[in-house]
Image: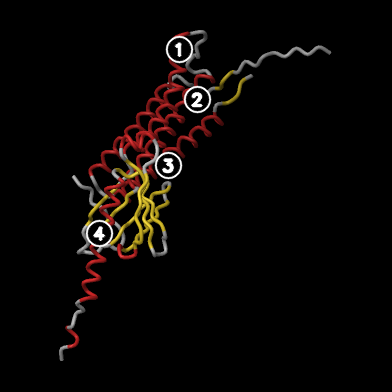
C-alpha cells in the first residue's frame, strides 16, 4: 500500500509552526515583563538557540526523505478461514 | 547586580526593601522532571540503535515519523523548560517601605499584580514543610491584611523567617510613626 506524503507534511508543518509560534510568544512575554535586562536577553538567546538547534537537527535528519514521492507501508496479510 | 523591578504605581520616594523570587530549587525540580521526560526516549533510542535488531532506513515512513515526532517532542519539552524558567523569573514578591507587591505570571498571557499598603497588614506568618524546604531553608510566607486581597502568600521563598521579621519590622515602624503623629499632632493649621 502506498500513499502520498503531502498530508503528513501539512500536519507536521502545522504542528511545528504552532510550536515555533508558542516559542516566539514566550520570548515576547519574557521581554515584555522581564524588562530589558542582560539575564532576560541571555535566557532568551539560549532558548532561541535551542529551538533553532532542534529544528535544524530534525530538518537535517530528514534530508533523505523524498517529499514529492510516496511512502510504502507493508500491511500484514490476514488470512480468513471461511 | 540587582534587577530593576518595575511594578504599577511605584512612587518616586518608595524604597525597595526586598525582591523575592521562588527558591532556585523549585525551578531545578521542575526542570529535572522535563530532563527525565526528554532523557527516557533518548535512552530507548540509544539502546535500540545499539541492539540493532532491526533498523529504520532513512526515507521510510517509520523513520520519517520517528524523526519528526521526536523533533516535535523535544521542541515541546524545550518550550516547557523555558515556561518553567519564565514562571520562576517573572513571579516576584516585592516589599517596599510602603507596601507589599505580589506579581504572579500564570501562563503566557496571564499576569496578576496584587498589592497592599503596609499599614493594612494584620498578621505575618511563615511555614517550612518537608525535607527539601527544611534543608535548603525555603517556605511560604503568609501575610494577612485588612484589604481586598485578604491573604498574600509568598510561595517557596528563601529564608521565610527573615522575610517575616522584615515585614513585621516595617509594619512596626509605620505603627510607631502613626502613634507619634497622634501624640504630637501637627499644629501648623492652628496658627493664624
Q: Nearer the viewer, mark 1 or mark 2?
A: 1
Spatial separation of the CA atoms under disc 1 and disc 3 = 32 Å
Which residue is under mark 3?
A22
Which residue is under mark 4?
B170
At 17% across and 83% down in the image, what residue appears?
B188
Spatial separation of the CA atoms under disc 4 and disc 3 = 42 Å
Who is closer to the viewer here, B163 or A41?
A: B163
Who is closer to the viewer here, B139 or B26?
A: B139
At 40% across and 55% down in the image, what residue appears?
B112
Secondary structure state at the residue bearing disc 4: helix
Is the Cβ of the residue at disc 4 closer than 8 Å to that at disc 3? no
Q: Is residue B149 left or right of residue B12?
A: right
Spatial separation of the CA atoms under disc 2 and disc 3 = 26 Å
Q: Position of residue A80 (x, y in %)?
A: 78, 13
Secondary structure state at the residue bearing disc 1: helix
Q: Nearer the viewer, mark 4 or mark 1?
A: 4
Both labels 4 and 1 in a single chain: yes
* Chain name for mark 4: B
* Chain name for mark 2: A
Spatial separation of the CA atoms under disc 4 and disc 1 = 63 Å
Which residue is under mark 2?
A67
* Chain name for mark 3: A
Q: How many marks?
A: 4
Residue occupying the far bottom of the picture: B192
Q: Is residue A35 above or below residue A19?
A: below
Is the Cβ of the residue at disc 2 closer than 8 Å to that at disc 3? no
Who is closer to the viewer here, B10 or B65?
A: B10
Both labels 4 and 2 in a single chain: no
Amino acid at each position: 500500500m502506498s500513499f502520498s506524503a503531502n498530508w503528513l507534511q501539512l500536519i507536521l508543518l502545522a504542528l511545528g509552526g504552532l510550536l515555533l509560534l508558542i516559542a516566539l510568544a514566550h520570548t515576547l512575554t519574557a521581554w515584555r515583563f522581564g524588562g530589558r535586562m542582560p539575564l532576560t536577553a541571555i535566557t532568551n538567546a539560549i532558548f532561541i538557540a535551542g529551538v533553532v538547534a532542534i529544528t535544524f537537527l530534525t530538518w537535517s535528519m530528514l534530508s533523505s526523505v523524498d517529499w514529492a514521492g510516496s511512502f510504502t507501508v507493508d500491511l500484514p496479510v490476514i488470512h480468513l478461514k471461511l | 547586580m540587582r534587577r530593576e523591578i518595575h511594578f504599577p504605581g511605584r512612587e518616586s520616594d518608595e524604597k525597595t526593601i526586598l525582591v523575592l523570587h521562588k527558591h532556585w530549587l523549585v525551578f531545578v525540580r521542575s526542570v529535572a522532571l522535563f530532563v527525565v521526560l526528554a532523557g527516557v526516549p533518548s535512552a530507548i533510542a540509544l539502546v535500540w540503535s545499539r541492539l540493532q535488531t532491526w533498523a529504520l532506513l532513512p526515507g521510510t515512513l517509520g523513520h520519517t515519523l520517528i524523526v519528526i515526532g521526536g523533533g516535535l517532542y523535544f521542541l515541546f519539552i524545550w518550550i516547557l523548560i523555558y515556561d518553567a524558567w519564565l514562571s520562576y523569573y517573572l513571579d516576584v514578591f516585592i516589599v517596599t517601605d510602603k507596601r507589599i507587591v505580589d506579581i504572579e505570571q500564570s501562563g503566557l498571557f496571564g499576569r496578576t499584580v496584587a498589592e497592599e499598603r503596609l499599614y493594612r497588614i494584620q498578621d505575618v506568618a511563615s511555614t517550612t514543610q518537608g525535607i527539601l524546604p527544611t534543608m535548603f531553608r525555603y517556605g511560604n510566607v503568609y501575610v494577612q491584611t485588612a484589604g481586598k486581597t485578604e491573604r498574600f502568600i509568598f510561595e517557596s521563598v528563601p529564608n521565610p523567617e527573615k522575610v517575616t521579621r522584615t515585614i513585621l519590622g516595617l509594619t512596626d515602624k509605620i505603627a510607631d510613626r502613626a502613634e507619634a503623629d497622634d501624640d504630637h499632632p501637627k499644629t501648623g493649621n492652628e496658627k493664624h
